Amino acid sequence: MAQYSRVLDAVALITLQNPPVNALSGRVRQGIVDTVQRALADPKVKSVVICGQNGVFCGGADIREFGSPMTGPPLVPMIHAIEAADKPVVAAIEGVALGGGLELALGCHYRIAQAKAKVGLPEVTLGLLPAAGGTQRLPRLTGLPAALDLITTGRHITAAEALELSIVDRLTDHSAVDAAVKFAVSVADQSLDARRISSRPCPCPPDLDALFEAAMRKVRHSSRGATAPVACVQALRAAATLPYSQGMQREKDLMATLFTSGQARALQYNFFAQRAVARWRLPGGARWDGSKPRPISKTAVIGLGTMGRGITVCLAQAGLSVVAVEVQEKPLKEAKQAISGMLRRGAKRRGVAPALDLITYSQNLRAVADVDLVVEAVFEDLDLKTQIFQQLSNICKPGALLCTNTSGLNVDLLASQSRRPELVVGMHFFAPAHVMKLLEVVYGSRSSPEAVATAMDLGKKMGKVGVAVGNCRGFVGNRMLKPYMEQGLFLLEEGATPESVDGTLEEFGFAMGLFRMSDLSGIDVGWKVRKGDGLVQPGAESRVRQGRRYSPLGDLLCERGRFGQKTGRGWYQYDKGHEARPDPWLHRFLEEYRARHGLVARRIDRQEVLERCLYSLINEGFRILEEGIAAGPEDIDVVYTFGYGWPKHRGGPMFYAGMVGLAKVLERLEHYQQTHPDVLYMQPCGLLRRLVASGSPPVHKWREIIKNTHSKI
Ligand code: 3H9
């Protein structure tokens, strides 16, 4: 809808109305067409202002309508009609003008923005390009380099940056609508010829080919196989080299290819999945009752190793005061320095003052007595964590939440050590904690809805994507990583190399292959846990454990002091910096290992690497859904795309399984189960079989089948 009113007699005010972000649905577009026509036909109206209700200009095309037959007038002719109007049309930008919203504003003759507004063309993040003239008008306004940056990254920019780039004409600290109305009166009779962006030439640097070659190289390198950024560059090239109308045609053609692609569907699914997990639900779909977050202002972090430091930075940057505790003097001193450096660098990037004053340091656990919430981030050692929880339970004021940053230990067990198990939850951050967006909020069997809601709310304040997950070894992310890693090791035994496995996974779109990731996070982490569980005997090379196939390769590397990046040697070698280089020592080591065990190396094709690594991980995802550890496939997919480098343009592991076809995934798992009968993770999960038996419904219908499964348990 678009509301029409008259202000100051001669100005028509058109207000977009489609909560919450005034997206350009069919009804809104129809409303705009009708009200603009009315304003232009009314001789008393001298100028027009377009704004959005509730302080939001427009969030762009209505993504909820994608995939359904189009209703209402199309966007491109609507914007052309506005640009062609013979009365000045002014966009009053408050809140956001994104995607089609900014394209609508670019069709207006003037743009006035509220100083706190943000604008951008984020279509690329949805697998699309700005196809309502954005790729043709923006470079005519900002020049090609800025347009290439904004359109290929999709980043949202501040109103101040938009002013610098000439995307908006004026800023106001007050109401953009009031300012726009006033401005509209002042330009009522002025010529509009120079204000129609489409009729301007596109400013081109002399070295156009070099500019586009560099841009193409950059997006191909960073997009990890995503097609939309490449199409964005192609559309911008058309803006630079073709007349406007032909450029528009090229934009339309490129959009048509992207729009129906699997990548766009995957990215749009991921957009909604990210929002769905914020409304956390129990497996089966029911919302937790009474799940209101508590107000938190004073927090504490126990243990200032890598994770503790990152978490301290996150909390301080969110404006919370933090008591940072490290019992030993030297690590405390080092942590202080590191945290101050991280805060200073972060503040410089964001153009704010570093939140150094919000942190107090202490060597004494008693310093946390009056905080509202504690995050324990000591070493991954159950005995140590147990001890800390017992102490915290006595020290902390009643009602304080006790959170653990364990990456996989039993949250129920830790909760049972405190006298307030209902206030214990896991807050599993990912390294580096101040950078990575994912936060697994782990609820135990006795965690109260209020405690979970508080941890989720705190995650949001820290700018994290929180996913509420149940308690089991490794929770969602690390549990699914186990079969994936295990297949990687088996592939090495059978003839692959770390670089051949990683190359295939990185070509699929992973930010990092599994061996590079293992080197980064430390091969010794899992080894120490296995040693703690009594599963590793020094020097033992048994390839069978508890009756199942097992690969001791990781253990053998750790025994040789190869822990990964931190020791300069792991699955790869590292000289200076973080660049992983193939290591001839490792290749020899693998050959000798195979010879000792009578294994004959064979050529393993990419298809097999992908199927074995990904389908075993996906199969574990189905088990997690079946057991109710994750509420739905979206939760798993958000964990993987935000925490494990799964390419967003492939949706996430569960969405990807749907794209491949559940029957195909099942058939391949059955095949590998036959060839590897001693590998537990290749045994297809019952839920996967049930989904296939129910005709492989699309991913958004799985919850229903899972719900029925749970109600029968
Ligand atoms: C486009 O414009 C194509 C064009 O070039 C033309 C082609 C011809 N549509 O994020 P939030 C919903 S493509 C429908 O939690 P925030 C969202 O799902 C579009 N719904 O709030 C959520 O619903 P629910 C380009 C939308 O304040 C609710 O609004 N535009 C849309 O943290 C609140 O969202 C974009 O890519 C939409 N366009 O952030 C912008 N946008 O409550 C995408 C949001 O049921 N949107 N919703 O879960 C955003 O980046 C953020 O939502 C925004 C608000 C910054 C606007």
Image: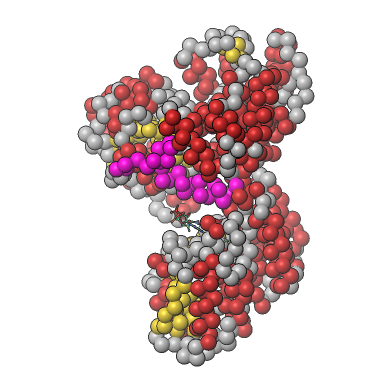
Q: Write down the quadrant of residue 421 in the picture.
A: top left
Question: Can residue 16 be seen by looking at this rendering?
Answer: yes
Q: Which residues are magenta?
A: 266-291
Q: Quarter-wise, where is residue 412 in the image? A: top left
Please identify the quadrant where the C terminus is shown: top left
Residue 357: give x, y in percent of width and height: 33, 46
Residue, far bottom: 43
Q: Is residue 377 left or right of residue 125?
A: left
Which of these two is toward me, 336 or 449? 449
Q: Is residue 280 above or below residue 208?
A: above
Is residue 296 a member of the stretch shown in magenta?
no
Query: Going 65% across and 25% down the picture, which residue do you hit?
Result: 670
Can residue 561 be seen in the rendering of this structure?
no
Q: Is residue 266 above or below residue 26?
A: above
Q: Is residue 72 above or below residue 309?
A: below
Q: Position of residue 352 (x, y in %)?
A: 42, 54
Relative side of 259 to 421, left or right: right
Name the residue nearer the viewer: 444 or 522: 444
Count of numbered circles on the image: 0
Give the residue at x 27% y 39%.
372
| Residue 490 % position (x, y) | 66, 20
